[in-house]
Image: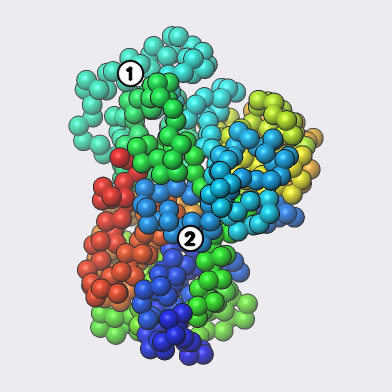
Amino acid sequence: MSPPGRDHLGSMSNRTAIIIGAGPAGLTAAYELLESTDVQPLVFELTDDVGGLARTVNYKGNRIDIGGHRFFSRSDRVMDWWQKILPLQGSTSNERVRIAYRNRFRDVDASSNGPDPDATDEVMLVRRRISRIFFNRRFFDYPITLSERTLRNLGLVESFRIGLSYLRVKVTPQREERSLEDFFINRFGDRLYRTFFKDYTEKVWGVPCNEIKPEWGAQRVKGLSAATAIWHAIKNLVKPRDESIEQKGSETSLIEQFLYPKLGPGQMWQEVARIVEERGGRIVYGKKAVRVHTQGKRVTAVDFRDEATGDIETVAGDYVFSTMAIKDLVAGFEADVPADVRRVAGGLIYRDFLTVGLLLNKMKVQGEERPGMPAGLVPDNWVYVQERDVRVGRLQIFNNWSPYMVADPDKIWVGLEYFCNEGDNLWSMPDDELTRFAAAELAKIDMIHAGDVLDSVVIRVPKTYPAYFGAYDEFDVARRYLDSFENLFLVGRNGMHRYNNQDHSMLTAIVAVQNIRDGITDKENIWAVNTEEEYHEEK
């Protein structure tokens, strides 16, 4: 390997950091090392692109955001970080975009000197958040509110039963939450949980909610409950919506708007990668970490296998940032790893994910008619599909994330999200068969006519969701062992086996770099991200 070059401050760096993975956590670590230390980042990425789970796939000019990534954070540092890379939009000069998407853009006064998104790609859009639940062939607000539409869709009898179930649990709650099912019931009541949460959650994880640890709810739902959803609805009736980008008074699940790169989330990480390399960092693609060399309580080097040639290269470094799955990281240790650590790491479970992108002439289900919009385009960014007779879990509508994600503005570009296990019948289904299956499912629930599908693509993503079951009960056994290596930093979603949002993954990398800069050896503050009040999704 060639010696590290000069960092952007012009000094010669004698220390290097090996960074496994070029997703949000890995690239944030590289950027922060160049910003605040003399440590040279060497980033190794398994695939041929950056962004990890936040990458954008470009299929014939139609872009897919894998999983849907709102750029919103309670951390001012992260919000400022994003806008430093891609500046906030000004008003657009494109009349078609202004008219057709007036309900989807928040126009920014041109005097703010923000770039025109129709004139440049390097820009962050400000987007309205609309997401709903599709259940019994009807749309429901998400989160569920006591709106006229909700009551009408449910009917008075069912609405009364749901309300009674909620009051019952408030009087006699489950004192010890032993499962995710207990967590949901305590916050929404048994009947609302079984109507709107149980089936979707079990689609995601493939196991019953009573077998999943409540930590998943604490990680993802936090302060949201029936009471907070109702209070949010009441507030919106009596006072204007929060128009600030920060929205610090809102639950994450209730935010009204968010930032979004013009060309999808991967655009952010492509730009960060460009800056990292421009400042002297190095990013290498098609390299898989297969072996970790140690001496005492330090990692001394990592072996990387070239996925094209099979060649092995040993790379020495002073620090190692790992965003790879802990299961694979521990399996690659050359050290005499304790048997209980290998057992726990080997027992960690991951849920896999695939997206079927469908290009449509129109949709059968109708949204509000808007000038210049494709026929039948509903306003949602995404729709939670709660229907029990189909396997699709969520529907992304990429036109509504950014109009620039779609090559032809007269077409509708959607992504059907399926949760599966690598190697199962859904994962292994041939692409053409999977396309027919997905189109048939949307037709079955009356969202499209199968004949309106023009083109398609299938994208499979392994290890998308670290699971809160399997060996997770004993996760601290593996964590303590890995944290004992003083120069090894676990960051990001899979790196920490934690269902982090993008901003939380970034913050773990930022804190890890601060520890290097400040000589802090304890890792507790890294693990505190998304658990301390400062990082909570709740107020």
Task: Classify residue 135 by image quadrant.
Answer: top right
User: Which of the two discs, 1 and 2, labels the residue nearer the N terminus?
Assistant: 2
Residue visible at 62% across and 40% down?
400
The single residue placed furthest to the front in the displayed view is 111
Q: Is residue 235 above or below residue 275?
A: above
147 left or right, relative to 221: right
Q: Nearer the viewer, residue 341 or 12?
A: 12
Give the alpha-carbon distance from disc 1 to disc 2, as whole Å. 48 Å
Q: Residues within 10 Å of mark 1 (few under 14, many from 20)?
A: some
- Residue 165 image label: 1
The picture places residue 412, in percent across and down from the top left corner, at 71, 39
Q: Which is more foreground, mark 1 or mark 2? A: 2
Q: Nearer the viewer, residue 41 or 434?
A: 41
Amino acid under label 1?
Ser
Residue visible at 28% across and 18% down?
167
Task: Classify residue 369 by image quadrant.
Answer: top right
The residue indicated by pointer 2 is 84
Residue visible at 73% across and 54% down?
61
Q: Is residue 213 above or below residue 21?
A: above
The picture places residue 128, in percent across and down from the top left corner, at 54, 37
The picture places residue 288, in percent across and down from the top left corner, at 51, 74
Q: Are marks 1 and 2 in contact (CB under 8 Å)?
A: no
Amino acid under label 2?
Lys
221 left or right, relative to 84: left
